[in-house]
Image (spheres, rainbow, N blue to C red):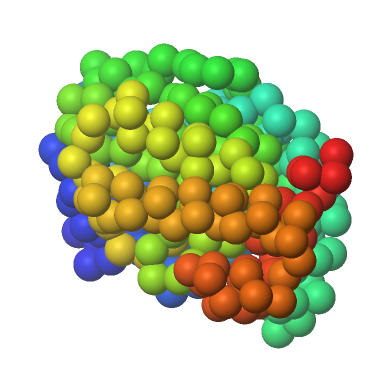
């Protein structure tokens, strides 16, 4: 088996990549498997396929946890399989996929050739609130609990293994990313996930696999960010910014996004 795979439940695997410290998931059933996110490029997708084939030769279904490039740029290599995502995930990739590419090219000029060869492929199977998949006899539930890290985060609940793939609603090893987030909603969304999914194992979009206590602690941090942002909107930033639980650059990004929500 590929040494990067970690089995976190019965035939449920996580592969942690050096690129963006990102996690992809694999759920293996009888003669079928589920792939959760596909990486940053076709090259990463091809490497992932090689790694999957060291565990199973079964056909796959794919899930994109949300519409950020590092979670879907490998999609084309997994066709003609079904690719599942939230309805807004498909819409945003369709509308903004080339802008995503241009943005990443600006940040990663050394990977230009790798990124230019990517074919933008959005999910072709979508839902708004929930969807039930049957993966080789194993029930897998896809849920959208609300706005958070993006407009279209979904959670993959592997019910018979006690494992939740939370996407970037949960981050380990670095602060949450607020670039196009909804800071006022994010703690509410995470709290709903915890309330409805009483599982012991959570796989974040990036970083090490965590437990419920970690997710609960991060939810409290996100709630503090939302409350401080509301206060900052009224009182000003100078004194309050030091009270945020994250570094100043992350805090200012969160405040900017929160102010956009409050001003709307």
**187 vs 161: above or below:** below
Q: Position of residue 83 (x, y in %)?
A: 56, 31
Q: Which image quadrant: the C terminus?
A: top right
Observer able to see residue 234? yes
Q: How many marks?
A: 0
Q: Which image quadrant: the N terminus?
A: bottom left
**130 vs 224: above or below:** above
Q: In this image, 8 relative to 140: left or right?
A: left
In the image, 204 versus 197, the foreground residue is 197
**198 vs 102: above or below:** above
Q: Residue at x 66, y 55 (%)?
A: 231
**220 vs 61: above or below:** below
Q: Position of residue 6 (x, y in %)?
A: 22, 57
Q: Residue at x 23, y 67 (%)?
A: 3
Q: Residue at x 44, y 39 (%)?
A: 190
The image quarter containing residue 121 is top right
Q: Position of residue 257 (x, y in %)?
A: 74, 54
In the image, 75 versus 141, the foreground residue is 141
Q: Residue at x 25, y 38 (%)?
A: 163
Observer able to see residue 49? no
């Amino acid at each position: 088996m590929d040494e990067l795979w970690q089995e976190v439940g019965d035939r449920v695997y996580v592969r942690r990549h050096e690129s963006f410290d990102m996690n992809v998931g694999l759920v293996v059933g009888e003669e079928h498997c589920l792939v959760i996110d596909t990486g940053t490029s076709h090259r990463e997708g091809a490497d992932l396929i090689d790694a999957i084939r060291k565990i199973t030769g079964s056909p796959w279904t794919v899930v994109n946890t949300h519409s950020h490039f590092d979670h879907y740029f490998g999609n084309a290599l997994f066709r003609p399989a079904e690719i599942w995502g939230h309805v807004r995930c498909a819409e945003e990739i369709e509308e903004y996929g080339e802008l995503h590419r241009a943005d990443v090219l600006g940040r990663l000029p050394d990977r230009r050739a790798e990124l230019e060869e990517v074919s933008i492929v959005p999910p072709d199977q979508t839902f708004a609130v929930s969807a039930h998949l049957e993966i080789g006899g194993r029930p897998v539930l896809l849920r959208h609990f609300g706005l958070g890290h993006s407009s279209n985060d979904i959670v993959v609940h592997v019910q018979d293994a006690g494992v939740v793939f939370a996407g970037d609603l949960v981050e380990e090893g670095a602060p949450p990313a607020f670039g196009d987030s909804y800071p006022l909603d994010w703690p509410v969304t995470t709290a709903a996930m915890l309330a409805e999914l009483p599982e012991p194992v959570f796989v974040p979009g990036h970083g090490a696999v965590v437990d419920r206590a970690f997710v609960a602690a991060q939810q409290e941090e996100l709630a503090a960010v939302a409350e401080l942002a509301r206060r900052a909107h009224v009182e000003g930033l100078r004194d309050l910014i030091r009270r945020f639980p994250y570094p100043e650059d992350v805090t200012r990004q969160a405040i900017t996004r929160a102010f956009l929500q409050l001003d709307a």
